[in-house]
Amino acid sequence: MRWHVDWLLRLAIEFYLVKLQTYQLQRLGYVQAIYETGARVTHDVKNLLQSLQTLCYAANQPGDPAQVAALLGRQLPQIADRLKATLEKLQSPQIEAPEQRESGLAIWVVFADGCLAVSDNGSAVADAVADALFCQPVKSDDGLGIGLYHAGRQADGAGYTLALTENRPGAVTFSLSQQP
């Protein structure tokens, strides 16, 4: 009987470890995708800068001004298109209709006793989202869902705690305080 209980306990532990590893890999994959997107955009900007530097160099060389003008006339529109495409990668998701935001929303900021509190009179954060806010990226209707996750990690790294201290309809408060 002891062998069976021991075996079941080991099986439960293995199951838990697999679930934990799966969760960590999902979170890591999400964050890695964000960083890789940033790296690609940075690479695109560097390439555009290099193209512009090459054109500036060519424009300053002696030669036929008509050929330089033709070169610039061909290359600058292509660079402008590439720059536009790169900037579109940086654009945040657009809200399709302004009705998605709460009207009449008021925000208060209070700094007292070494704690910064930001409150609003909007809707409460859903419990499933509130539990994950500072631990992992969350589902977002109009963003990437990583803002508070990264803010919480940065606060923690600087010796502060970012928390959702009040969460009810008409009274939602986030606070930033120094860790004890």
Image (tube, rainbow, N blue to C red):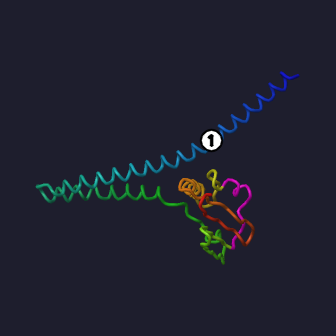
Q: Position of residue 85 (x, y in %)?
A: 42, 56
Is 176 on the left or on the right of 56, as rendered?
Answer: right
Q: Nearer the viewer, residue 160 or 78?
A: 160
Query: Which quadrant would residue 174 be assigned to in this image?
Result: bottom right
Q: Is residue 76 left or right of residue 144?
A: left
Residue 117 locus on image (x, y percent): 63, 69
Foreground pick, 90 / 76: 90
Picture coordinates of residue 148, whole percent (x, y): 60, 58
* Residue ID at (57%, 54%): 156
Instruction: Locate the N terminus and report the quarter of the image it occupies.
Output: top right
**Above or below 58: residue 4:** above
Q: Which residue is mark 1?
A: 24
Q: Kindly indicate the quadrant of the structure image that contains residue 64.
A: bottom left
Q: Amino acid at mark 1?
A: Gln
Question: Most extreme residue toward the right, as rendered?
Answer: 1
Which quadrant would the C terminus be assigned to in this image?
bottom right
Is 165 on the left-hand or right-hand side of 5?
Answer: left
Q: Which residues are magenta?
A: 121-132
Q: Residue at x 16, y 57 (%)?
A: 60
Q: Residue 111 colored magenta?
A: no
Q: Residues within 10 Å of mark 1 (few under 14, many from 20)?
A: few
Q: In percent of the image, x 67 and y 62: which residue is there?
A: 164
Task: Label 1: state its secondary structure.
Answer: helix
Asked if residue 159 lies left or right of residue 1, the reply is left
What residue occupies the far front of the structure in this picture?
180
Q: Which image quadrant for residue 72? A: bottom left
Q: Is residue 57 above or below residue 6?
A: below
